[in-house]
């Protein structure tokens, strides 16, 4: 008996259970990622005053710039959500459109962030300048690395949906990607508040 | 139709969500972000209370997005996702608050006076 | 950070060690590898090896591989011990001892790292892979491909740490590599980098396994098996995996930060420019304490199964045992400062963590009493696993009491980093984790390999371990009180320590005999496997579901997924007389995941990532990472080839060919 026939004979429930496990497993993985970020936040909190004679956050952070970044990421989380709804409802073109928008906004965010990093690194505020800067770059940079992975994943998913449509597997992976992308905006809320806002407020 | 049934089990939160959930979540998040931003750039409160307020605002936005975007708490019982989230929060609080308490204690007790003086004189503002 | 050419900082002079014992190690490992390759070639088993083992996603096979690797690493870690004991027994006064100091430092660093990360974690994950799906009545784990990848990542870490013997050197900074010693200035060589990447890669494997088994236990229990009907071993694994998931990310971060300090000049833990060395100690132990509970909880679970089975009684106090596990799990995140009371925190911080450390001893004590109560009025069969259990009860209790002493910060100021501490934690790990894992292996291996092992020889081995342990570590408790610190390679003769070190060396020799007996009996058992065949699937009159299926277990585990109505479901079925299952059972086609080389590929690429980062061949690292992404992208393209069918007729054939308990 071929695999397709065997699967057809098998209860649809098994497939659904497998999807359910995938989503739950991924959620659990994200919880562990939260602990990873928490360790980086703890390190930042311990080291944020250790400027070693170098610049502090207050001197370095360009708040309007950060606000633009934040809005880009927040909007991308929104468009991602709309893409998820489209996937649920089987609207393939809407899925491609919304996720492309999400990708564009995500690239905007990442570009702004990399430009900021580059500027800091080339003006004597690189990550080997002080404990504070080491912690800053690593915390924000780890978030940026996650964003990068998300963007690569998004490109793969968009091309898969264009290629084979909204198959069960594609919908499952889009769901995971969506959860991942929302989670990254959640982490950014804390980076925005604890690193940028608090860094600027401490006078 | 079967695909729809599949996605219902796939992410039960997503199954019952509507556009409204995302729009309102987005709108509230924008408002909270701008509010916190303006409070800091205009220095509306002294630093101590200001920090407390923006932390509360951050938590509010966190909760908003958890509910509106991630539909946490809307799954049918047993609520394993919610449970894992709560467990994570507890562990994170222990690790972060614990580390802050421990390190603050250690750093204040284990820094010799000359070192402290040097560090203070070097403190960028 | 400079890109120093194609080979980074690897030069010809790194390619072979200069110290005799290390040379001997490299040569023996090399010969061993050659012998293994020759054997497989001679038996023409390459295709078989590839098809049945290297590309498998079957947790039973993966479990066996974990155990093989762990046992090999046990031998290596043990050889490290023999050398250390020899050194400490002889290097007194004018005598130089058997190894140079720099080698001694690498020995104790390698010993701890290997024993914790590769022996204890390996045995644990091996047993978990073998047993958990069977105990919960499932056919597989939640994410089979992820499971295979985790194993190969574990292997990559193992290969890295062994590579450090021949190519370069290992860390001399202890098994936890505290800064500033582990920072670039005081450890400029590759040793600490080997340590970092070996653990980082293996650690990611562990984290993924943690998620995998956590989801498996929560989501794949058979019908009727509520959590409160689940066997205690599976409960202990659930709790342990919870700890893995929430502790290992802290290790990932800490190792990364240390590497950044060394490789790119950041200042997380440096002695200037705003670094905070104490933060490293804080972070590494925030991981490190949960880690020891990760190791010991499954061992407790094993004892719960073993004691109940060999006492022919249900486990006493099931609910309190579950609550105790849950309590230990939560509390294990609240005690970590007890590893650095002497770093200088105030009385408030130290007192809080000291109290919490004492509190966590309480649920552990509850468990010991429950095991003893299980034995009380049972019909006890003193098998080899029970020998290990009895050794555990006495030794672990005493070691635990020593731990409660150390939990008092004022006492700890006297005993921190003395040999008293070393004796304490070895008592916990050896009599707890190791004895538990040994008992589990003896108890469960027959289910997987299909034949029993030699109980008499294993009892001799248990005696060697118990007596050897007392001789090896009893003196260390005394030495600690006498002021001997850990990690000393040389001491003055007027300390009076030497006789005690000699006794300790004798103890290690006896343990070595015990290990030799274990390995010997394994070979003998393989040779005698036809006589010792387990024909019923239930050699110990077991209580739980894994004993209801044939030995060795068919690839699909259960021909028909069981439905359960209470605890100790198989025992209940046997009492009712219907353990064999209905004669007129309807077999169905079974879908199983197909083999894949992707896990092995990812493991090998991970090794390349680690190796190139260590030797600063930075051009190659992104390529290896890219290759991993490509493998994953290809792998996640689901096709029909990713699954295979076992037809109902095949299932029936397999079931008929293997005898089962209760069947005619």
Image (cartoon, coloured by chain):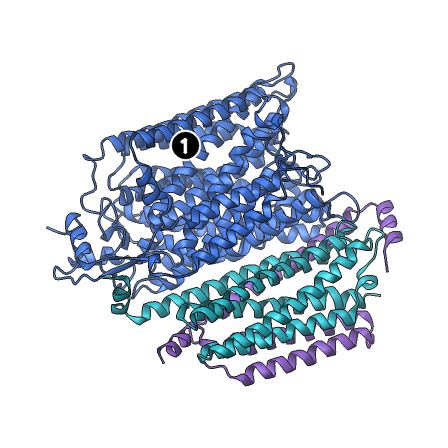
Chain colours: A cyan, B purple, C blue
Side (left or right) of B107 relative to C147: right
Q: Residue furthest left?
A: C664
Task: Report the chain holding disc 1.
Answer: C
Q: Residue furthest right?
A: B121
Quadrant of the snapshot with the N terminus of chain C = top right
Q: Position of residue C537 (x, y in %)?
A: 22, 47
Q: Quadrant of residue C431?
A: top left
What is the secondary structure assignment of the residue under circle 1? Answer: helix
Disc 1 crowd rating (10 Å Cα; few below 14, some 14-19, many 20+) is many
Relative to residue C55, is residue C635 depicted above or below?
below
Which of C3 and B25 lies nearest the eye of the viewer?
Answer: C3
Which of C315 and C23 lies nearest the eye of the viewer?
Answer: C23
Side (left or right) of C537 relative to B97: left
Q: Position of residue C349 (x, y in %)?
A: 68, 53
Q: Quadrant of residue C33?
A: top left
Q: Is there any visible trace of residue C445 in the rendered image? A: yes
Side (left or right) of A197 relative to C422: right
Q: Residue at x 53, y 39 (%)?
A: C425
Which of C196 and C448 lies nearest the eye of the viewer?
Answer: C196
Q: Residue furthest front?
A: A163
**What residue is pinned by disc 1?**
C466
Which of C326 and C354 lies nearest the eye of the viewer?
Answer: C326
Q: Is there any visible trace of residue C321 in the rendered image? A: no
């Amino acid at each position: 008996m071929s695999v397709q026939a065997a699967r057809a004979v098998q209860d649809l429930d098994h497939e659904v259970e497998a999807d359910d496990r995938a989503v739950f497993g991924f959620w659990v993985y994200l919880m562990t990622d939260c602990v990873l970020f928490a360790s980086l936040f703890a390190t930042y909190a311990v080291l944020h005053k250790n400027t070693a004679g170098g610049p502090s956050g207050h001197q370095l952070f360009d708040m309007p710039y950060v606000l633009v970044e934040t809005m880009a990421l927040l909007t991308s989380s929104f468009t991602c959500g709309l893409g998820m709804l489209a996937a649920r409802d089987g609207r393939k073109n809407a899925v491609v459109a919304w996720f492309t928008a999400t990708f564009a906004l995500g690239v905007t965010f990442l570009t702004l962030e990399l430009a900021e990093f580059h500027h800091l690194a080339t003006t004597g505020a690189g990550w080997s300048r002080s404990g504070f800067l080491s912690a800053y770059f690593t915390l924000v940079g780890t978030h940026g690395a996650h964003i990068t992975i998300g963007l690569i994943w998004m490109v793969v998913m968009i091309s898969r949906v264009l290629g084979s449509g909204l198959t069960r597997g594609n919908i499952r992976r889009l769901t995971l990607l969506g959860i991942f992308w929302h989670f990254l905006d959640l982490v950014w809320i804390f980076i925005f508040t604890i690193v940028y806002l608090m860094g600027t407020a401490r006078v | 139709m079967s695909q729809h049934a599949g996605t219902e089990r796939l992410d039960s939160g997503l199954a019952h969500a509507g556009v409204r959930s995302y729009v309102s979540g987005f709108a509230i998040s924008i408002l909270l972000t701008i509010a916190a931003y303006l409070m800091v750039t205009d220095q509306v409160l002294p630093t101590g209370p200001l920090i407390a307020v923006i932390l509360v605002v951050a938590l509010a936005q966190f909760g908003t997005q958890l509910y509106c975007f991630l539909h946490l708490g809307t799954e049918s019982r047993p609520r394993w996702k919610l449970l894992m989230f709560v467990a994570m929060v507890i562990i994170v609080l222990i690790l972060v608050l614990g580390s802050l308490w421990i390190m603050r204690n250690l750093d204040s007790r284990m820094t010799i006076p000359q070192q402290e003086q040097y560090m203070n004189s070097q403190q960028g503002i | 950070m400079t890109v120093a050419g194609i080979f980074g900082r690897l030069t010809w002079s790194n390619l072979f060690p200069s110290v005799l014992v290390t040379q001997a190690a490299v040569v023996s490992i090399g010969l061993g590898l050659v012998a293994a390759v020759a054997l497989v070639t001679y038996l023409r088993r390459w295709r078989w090896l590839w098809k049945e083992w290297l590309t498998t996603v079957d947790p039973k096979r993966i479990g066996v591989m974990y155990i093989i690797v762990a046992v090999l690493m046990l031998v290596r870690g043990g050889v490290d011990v023999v050398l250390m004991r020899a050194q400490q027994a002889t290097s007194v006064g004018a005598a130089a001892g058997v190894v140079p100091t720099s080698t001694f430092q690498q020995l104790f660093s390698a010993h701890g790292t290997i024993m914790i990360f590769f022996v204890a974690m390996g045995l644990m994950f091996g047993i978990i892979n073998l047993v958990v799906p069977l105990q919960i009545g499932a056919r597989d784990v939640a994410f089979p491909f992820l499971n295979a990848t985790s194993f190969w990542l574990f292997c990559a870490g193992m290969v890295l740490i062994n590579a450090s013997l021949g190519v370069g050197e290992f860390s001399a900074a202890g098994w936890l590599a505290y800064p500033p010693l582990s920072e670039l200035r005081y450890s400029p060589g590759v040793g600490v980098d080997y340590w970092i990447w070996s653990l980082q890669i293996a650690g990611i494997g562990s984290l993924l396994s943690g998620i995998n088994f956590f989801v498996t236990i929560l989501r794949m229990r058979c019908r009727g098996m509520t959590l409160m009907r689940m066997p205690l071993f599976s409960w202990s694994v659930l709790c342990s995996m919870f700890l893995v998931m929430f502790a290992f990310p802290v290790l990932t971060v800490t190792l990364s930060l240390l590497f950044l300090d060394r490789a790119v000049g950041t200042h997380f833990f440096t002695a200037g420019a705003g670094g905070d060395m104490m933060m490293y100690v804080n972070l590494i132990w925030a991981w490190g304490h949960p880690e020891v509970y990760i190791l010991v909880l499954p061992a407790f679970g094993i004892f719960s199964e073993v004691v109940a089975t060999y006492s022919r009684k249900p486990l006493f106090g099931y609910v309190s045992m579950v609550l105790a596990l849950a309590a230990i799990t939560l509390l294990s995140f609240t005690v970590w400062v007890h590893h650095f009371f002497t770093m200088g925190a105030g009385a408030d911080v130290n007192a809080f963590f000291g109290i919490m450390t004492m509190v966590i001893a309480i649920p552990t004590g509850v468990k010991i009493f429950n095991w003893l109560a299980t034995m009380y009025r049972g019909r006890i069969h003193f098998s080899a696993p029970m020998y290990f259990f009895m050794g555990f009860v006495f030794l672990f209790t005493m070691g635990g009491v020593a731990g409660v002493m150390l939990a008092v910060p004022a006492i700890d100021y006297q005993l921190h980093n003395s040999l008293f501490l070393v004796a304490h934690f070895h008592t916990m790990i050896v009599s707890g984790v190791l004895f538990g894992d040994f008992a589990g292996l003896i108890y469960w291996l027959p289910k997987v390999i299909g034949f029993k092992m030699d109980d008499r020889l294993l009892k001799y081995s248990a005696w060697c371990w118990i007596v050897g342990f007392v001789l090896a570590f009893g003196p260390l408790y005394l030495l600690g009180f006498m002021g001997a610190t850990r990690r000393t390679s040389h001491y003055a003769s007027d300390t009076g320590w030497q006789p005690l070190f000699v006794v300790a060396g004798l103890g290690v020799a006896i343990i070595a005999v015990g290990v030799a007996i274990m390995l010997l009996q394994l070979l003998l058992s393989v040779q005698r496997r036809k006589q010792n065949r387990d024909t019923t699937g239930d050699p110990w009159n077991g209580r739980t579901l894994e004993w209801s299926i044939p030995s060795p277990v068919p690839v699909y585990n259960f021909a028909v997924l069981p439905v359960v109505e209470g605890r100790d479901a198989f025992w209940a079925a046997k009492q009712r007389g219907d353990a064999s299952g209905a004669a007129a059972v309807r077999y169905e086609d079974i879908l199983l995941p197909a083999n894949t080389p992707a896990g092995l590929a990812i493991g090998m690429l991970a090794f390349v990532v680690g190796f190139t980062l260590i030797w600063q061949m930075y051009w190659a690292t992104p390529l290896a990472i890219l290759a991993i992404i490509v493998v994953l992208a290809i792998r996640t393209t689901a096709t029909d080839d990713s699954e295979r069918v076992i037809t109902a007729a095949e299932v029936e054939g397999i079931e008929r060919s293997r005898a089962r308990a209760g069947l005619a």
